[in-house]
Amino acid sequence: MITRHHMALALMCALILCSAFFLSNPFMMALVVAGTCIGVLLPDIHMTRPKHHPFRTVSWLIVQYPRRICAPVLCRIYAHTRHPVPDPADKRLIHSIPGAVFVFVCTCALLYIPACATGNAIICNSAAAFLGGVILGMVLHLVEDLCTRKGIFPFFPFNPWTVAGSIRPCDKTDPRIAQYHIQHCMVLLVFFGLDSMGILAPELFLPLNITGLVICLGTMVYFSEVSIRRNPESDGDMKVPSPVKST
């Protein structure tokens, strides 16, 4: 999906979860939401620099962290295996479970270890909340992208299979992405309404919020006609996909 779709859907998913944990703590809620909004951008290392639009420029700057630091290191690691990846800008590198985990581990090393070194519980808890949002955002990015025709590459470069759906994100005649936005928004409003009216027991919020999030993502995957298929680029010489401009 394109950047604005990723951001909107991830933001609503983060707020759905935060409504179960952090409504009474706006600071922690802001950290989780901020981490999610950043994490949902990180897999798009193939993003090209926009000539206009400040929001997309900020997104591009955030993506330079995994593109210039994490991806080259990961390529060096893969070079010592039977599955080398020659191009650090190959989108499949981070649109995979190993790649996403590697970026998250690097982020933890940059943020959580220094936070723990301070010995301050508030700083450690804040870093943990932010990192929780980061991993949530990265997971949501992969789930959202597997609904598109380009899909994701779960075990790249070790496995040639692709998980992909039928959505073309730039196809304005396809109403499904707009329907997913409405669905996520409705679930979010229901939970905020239940909390504000106080008619739901606090111990029920977490299971209901998780259920609501799973239903949102599950229906999105189902109606996107997701299937597993072999990635033709993994046969023979590996071709590098051309950069896709973020909008």
Image (cartoon, grey):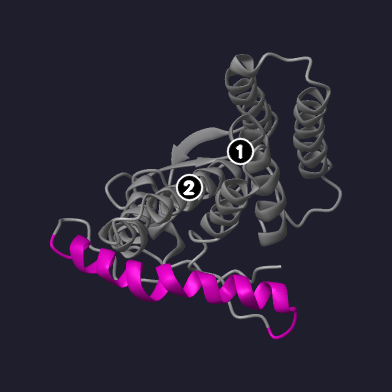
Quarter occupied by residue 192: top right
Q: Is residue 63 visible?
A: yes
Local crowd size for mark 2, using a 10 Å CA cut-off: few (<14), some (14–19), many (≥20): many
User: Tags 1 and 2 in contact by the CB under 8 Å rule?
Assistant: yes
Q: Main secondary structure of the magenta part?
A: helix
* Residue 113 point in image, percent of width and height: 28, 58
Spatial CA distance of label 1 from label 2 is 10 Å
Nearest the eye: 117 or 93: 117
Residue at screen point 37% across, 49% down: 121
Location of residue 50 with respect to 197 vertically, above or below: below
Location of residue 238 with respect to 12 vertically, above or below: below
Nearest the eye: 209 or 90: 209
Nearest the eye: 28 or 141: 28
Quarter occupied by residue 188: top right
Residue at screen point 31% across, 44% down: 159
* Residue 46 point in image, percent of width and height: 51, 69
For label 2, the residue is 129
- Report the side of 210 relative to 132 (left or right): right
- Report the side of 115 relative to 222 (left or right): left
User: Which circle's residue, 1 or 2, is located before the other in the chain?
Assistant: 1
Q: Which residues are magenta?
A: 51-80
Residue at screen point 64% across, 25% down: 209
For label 1, the residue is 22
Identify residue type, mark 1: Phe
* Residue 163 point in image, percent of width and height: 49, 40
Q: Is residue 87 visible?
A: no
Is residue 76 inside the magenta stretch? yes
Identify residue type, mark 2: Ala
Location of residue 142 with respect to 16 vertically, above or below: below
Q: Among all residues in the image, which is located at the extreme bottom?
A: 51
